[in-house]
Amino acid sequence: MKLYYCLILLLFLGGCLSVSKEQRTTVQQFAVKAGNFSTLPEKIWMELADIRELRGVYYANSFNDPLIHLSELDAIVRERISNDKIPTRVRPVFKILENYANGLVQLSSDASFNANVKLYGTFGTELETLVGDYNQTTEVSKLPPGLGTLLAETLNLGTNAYLSNRQSKALKKYVNQADTLVSCLCSEIEKYLSSGLLIQLISNEDSGLGESFRYYFTKRMPPSIKSERDYIELKKRIEMLKEFRLQTLHAVKNLRIAHLALAETLNETKTLKEMAACLSSFYTDVEKLYKMVDEINKKI
Amino acid sequence: MIKMDKKITLEEIRKAQFDILVAMTEKSLSPEAMQSLEKTSQHLRNLERLLVSSFEKRLIVALKNESMALNALTEEMKRTSEQLSELTVTLRKIVKITGQIIDILELVK
C-alpha cells in the first residue's frame, strides 16, 4: 500500500509542478536572447573609442609643428590603450546577467530533461528484469503477469515526474529569485545608459568631431575627398551611437518586463500567450541592436 | 581665455578651441604665433582628454559600487544554483528507492 501511495503522490506532484515543454522552450529562448543582449552595451565604449581615435588623427594632422603632431599621435595611442580597458571594467555587471542566462539555458535545456528520462528508463528496465527474475525463482505467490512491466512503467513515469518536478521546481525558484536580481541589474544598467555623463561623452565626440575636422580643413586646404568621406562616415557613426544608446535603454526596460512575465508564466499567473507580447518586444529590441552592431562593424 | 580656478567644462574647452581656430585663420599670423596657438590647442585637447577620462571613471565607479550592492543577491543566486546539484543526489536516492521497491515486492509474496 505504501508503494501505491508513494507512486500516486509522485504522479500527483508531477502533474502539479512540472514545467511544460512549451514553457521550457520559452525560457530557453529568453535566456539565449538575454545572454546575447548582455554582450551588447559594451559596444558603446568600443564605438566611442574608435570615433575618438579617427577624429584624433585628423586633428593631429592639422599641426604644422612636427613635434606637436607626433606628441598628439602618441596621446591618441595612450588614450586608446586606456579606452580599450573600459569594456573589461564595465563587463562584470553585464557578466552577472550573462551567467544567469547561461544557468537558465542549462536548467531549461531539453538535453538535461532528456538525459534524466533516458537514465530513469534504465531503472525501469532494471526493475522489469528483477521482477522477471523474481517470478522465475519463486514457486508460490508469483507476481501477477505484467506487474513488472506495469511497475517499471509506473516507476519510470513516477521518477520522471518526480525528477522533472525537482528540475521544474528549481527552474521556477531560479527564475523567481532572479527576478529581483534582473530587476536590480536592469535598473542599474538603465541608470548607466541614461546617465548625464554618458550622454555628455557621446555629445562631446559629436562636437569634437566637427572641431577636429575644422582644424584639419583650416590647415589642409583643399581637403581630400577621403577626408570628407571619413567625416561623413564618422558623423553617421555618431548618430548611430546615439540611437544605439537609446535602443539599448529600450531593450533593458523590455528585458525587465519580459523577465517578470516569464516568472509569472512559470507561476501560472500569466498565460504563455500573455507573455508572448512582452517577450516579443524584448526580442525585437535585441534584433535591432544586432543589426546596428552589424552596421557598425561594416564601417570599421 | 579660461579661468583655471573653477571647474572647467567640456563646453568651455570647445569654445576656447573655436577661438583658437578663428585666430589661426588670421593671415598676418607669424610662425611663432601659429606655434603657440597650436600648443595652446594641444593643451586644451589634453585637458579635454583628462575631463573625458574622469567622466569615464565616474561612470565605471558608479556602476561598480552599485554592482557591489548586488553581491548579496548574487550570493543568493549561487545558493539556488547549488540546489541544482541536488538533482545528482536525488538520482543516487532513486537507486535506493528501486531497492526498497524490491523489498516491498518481497513482502507482497
Image: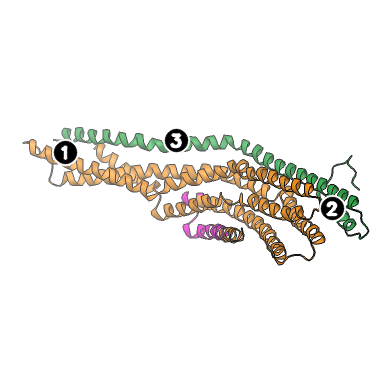
Q: Give the residue number, with chain letter if any, for mark 3.
A: B82
Within 10 angstroms of label 3, few (less than 14), some, or many (20 or more) residues? few
How far is the residue under mark 2 from the one under mark 1? 89 Å
Q: Which of A211 and B40 is in front in this view?
A: B40
Q: Do the residues labelled 1 and 3 touch (CB within 8 Å)?
A: no
Q: Which chain carries label 2?
A: B
How far is the residue under mark 1 from the one under mark 3? 35 Å
The secondary element bearing badge 3 is classed as helix
How far is the residue under mark 3 from the one under mark 2? 58 Å
Instruction: Kindly identify the residue that appears in the image at 76 percent across and 52 percent down.
Output: A60
Query: How far from the left and from the top, in percent, is residue B70?
Result: 60, 38
Question: As drawn, which residue projects farthest toward the right?
Answer: B28
Q: Do the residues labelled 2 and 1 touch (CB within 8 Å)?
A: no
Instruction: Kindly identify the residue that appears in the image at 40 percent across and 36 percent down.
Output: B85
Q: Give the residue number, with chain letter if any, for mark 2.
A: B17
Query: How far from the left and from the top, in percent, is residue A177?
Result: 52, 41
Instruction: Kindly identify the residue that appears in the image at 64 percent across and 52 percent down.
Output: A44
Question: Same chain for marks 2 and 1?
Answer: no
Q: Is residue B21 above or below residue A222?
A: above
Within 10 angstroms of label 1, few (less than 14), some, or many (20 or more) residues? some
User: Most prominent secondary structure in the magenta stretch?
Assistant: helix
Amino acid beneath label 3: Glu
Span shown in magenta: A263-287
Q: Which chain is green?
A: B
Amino acid beneath label 2: Gln
Q: Does the magenta stretch include residue A120?
A: no
The secondary element bearing badge 1 is classed as helix
Query: Which mark is in front, 2 or 1?
Result: 2
Amino acid beneath label 1: Leu
Query: How far from the left and from the top, in percent, is residue B75?
Result: 53, 34
